[in-house]
Image (spheres, grey):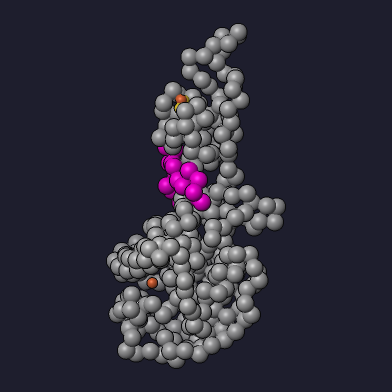
Amino acid sequence: MMPKNCWLIACQSSELKNKPLGVEILGKPIVIFRTRDEDKSITALEDRCPHRGVNLSQGRLIGNHIQCLYHGWQFGSDGECKKIPGRINSRGSDQSNPIKAKIYSYPVLEKDGFIWIGFNPKSDTPQPSLPHPISQKMDSFVWKTQAVGNLPNVLENFLDGFHTHYVHSGLVRSDTQRQRVIAEIFAQPDQVECKYRGETRQNGWISRLFEPSRQLTISRFLVPSTAQLDYIGKRGVNFRVTVFLTPVRPSLQMIHTRIETRKGILPNWLKCALLTPFLRKVTHQDLRILKLQNENNQRFGKEDFRSTELDIMRPYIVSLLEGKAPPPNRSINFMV
Ligand code: FES
Ligand SMILES: [Fe+2]
């Protein structure tokens, strides 16, 4: 289940400096680079030299061209071959493109601190953007990792509360002090949102240390591959975590996690320094269980899952990923 006709994050803007960068998205090797002229515009090409197939991402930039490291062919932002060293024609120049070699060039955009690549975007495919504009009231930092697991399983892991008592015992929640919660789910053609009321605070350390009292939690899935959690108190959102998933291959997801905290007395760098050890631990625990899940299901050759009504988000995630109408809106009570 890999997304189609969409924009996906390739990297943060800050990662693309003056060298070519190789990424793999939806199973396709891609090289990204910035031109060296003033506008520093970005190009994304298939990462394969048409001469003998070497990765262009291993080459170097010459002006606004990328040069292959094997025989030095140069390519421009349009993917066309601009120079073949050693070749002369009747005018003594080597600037022509005799073999009409052209590399596939992807649509690319730089927006909101990320570089996005378009995969067959249609005229009605929305432009890439963050699910919420960057707010002046919030501090934020971004953090990058990779998860072994398919797209629905990784999205579900992030949005599901019922594994937290076990996988993150003590850090996020513990099994001993459950609270009664009501969840209301609203689905639209391109997103689903679940509002949880009744959990005044998570009983794990992260919430105790970093979160004033809570009134509402919202979890969201946004097509094609973004998931978000909002922790909302009296003054609005206190804490927001957004994960942007980029499928590298069917069972491997690149993840950019954007952590936002409400501006307060502590400077952003200090919040980042204080939160990072907790987040690192939680992420490590999730990556471990996701890898186990993936490897075990592969041993059986396919997934064969049984679900209950507590697997709240899964049916919505799956139908939206498949481009089908989501199940009806509903509300349920449970202990979390
Ligand atoms: S393989 Fe790239 S120039 Fe020959
Ligand atoms: Fe988790």
Q: Quadrant of the N terminus?
A: bottom right
Q: Quadrant of the C terminus?
A: bottom left
- Residue 136 in the image: x percent, y percent? 50, 65
Q: Which quarter is ligand 2 in?
A: bottom left
Residue 21 visible? The answer is yes
Residue 224: x and y in percent read 57, 61
**Residue depicted at x 45% and y 76%:** 160
**Residue 201 located left or right of residue 223:** left
Specify whether residue 28 is painted magenta.
yes
Asked if one can make out residue 275 in the rendered structure from this viewpoint, the answer is: no
The region drawn magenta spans: 12-29
Query: Which residue in the rendered view is the most extreme toward the front?
Result: 300
Residue 79 in the image, given as x and y percentages of width and height? 57, 33
Q: Nearer the viewer, residue 54 or 272?
A: 54
Residue at x-position 53% and y-position 22%: 83
Where does the image place residue 253, in percent across and percent down from the top left? 44, 57
